[in-house]
Amino acid sequence: QVQLMESGGGLVQAGGSLRLSCAASGRIFRTNAMAWYRQAPGKQRELVASITSGGVTNYADSVKGRFTISRENARNMALELNSLQPEDTAVYYCNANLLRSGDTIARDYWGQGTQVTVSS
């Protein structure tokens, strides 16, 4: 059983900062890319930032220069959110493409999400 668990969401005023964390647990053989997605009410889930196993990062244009994704190791990832704006309000989801021990094909796993609310 593989699980991804997010933490660190909350309510913050515009211009404030938050730090989200994601921890993967279970019998993991290899973790490939990891990413953060978000979904605002009435909108589709969108990619916020991703990071490969080699540390190459990619950001949505809307968060470039404000958010920073990082990986501490194969199981732990973080997202620093700075200069937050009301339009950043959403549920943020952790995503990991990983190979579970005993499996032959890697697949995507998702966390349950953490709410980020930015007040104006």
Image: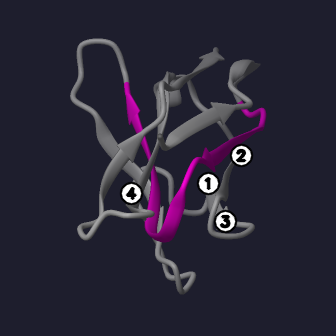
Secondary structure of the residue carrying tag 3 is: strand
Mark 3 and mark 2 lie on one chain; the one further toward the N terminus is: 3
Label 3 crowd (10 A; few <14 / some 14-19 / many >=20): many
Q: Nearer the viewer, mark 3 or mark 2?
A: 3
Horizontal and vertical percent position of residue 4: 54, 40
Please give the residue where the numbered disc 4 appears in the rendered image: 60
The three-letter amino acid code for the residue at tag 2 is Asn
Would you identify the image quadrant in which residue 13 lies?
top right
Please give the residue where the numbered disc 1 appears in the rendered image: 67
Frontmost residue, 43 versus 87: 43
Q: Are marks 2 and 1 in contact (CB under 8 Å)?
A: yes
Horizontal and vertical percent position of residue 45: 28, 33
Would you identify the image quadrant in which residue 116 lies?
top right
Secondary structure of the residue carrying tag 1 is: strand
Rendered position, 66 above or below 85 = below
Mark 3 and mark 4 lie on one chain; the one further toward the N terminus is: 4
Q: Main secondary structure of the magenta part?
A: strand
Q: Which quadrant does the C terminus fall into?
A: top right
Mark 2 and mark 1 lie on one chain; the one further toward the N terminus is: 1
Q: Residue at x 49, y 44 (%)?
A: 2
Q: Are marks 4 and 2 in contact (CB under 8 Å)?
A: no
Q: Residue at x 62, y 46 (%)?
A: 25
Please give the residue where the numbered disc 2 appears in the rendered image: 82
Secondary structure of the residue carrying tag 2 is: loop
Alpha carbon distance from label 3 to label 4: 15 Å
Please give the residue where the numbered disc 3 appears in the rendered image: 70
**Magenta-drawn segment:** 15-39
The three-letter amino acid code for the residue at tag 1 is Phe
Q: Nearer the viewer, mark 3 or mark 4?
A: 3
Label 2 crowd (10 A; few <14 / some 14-19 / many >=20): some
Alpha carbon distance from label 4 to label 2: 14 Å
Q: Residue at x 75, y 67 (%)?
A: 72
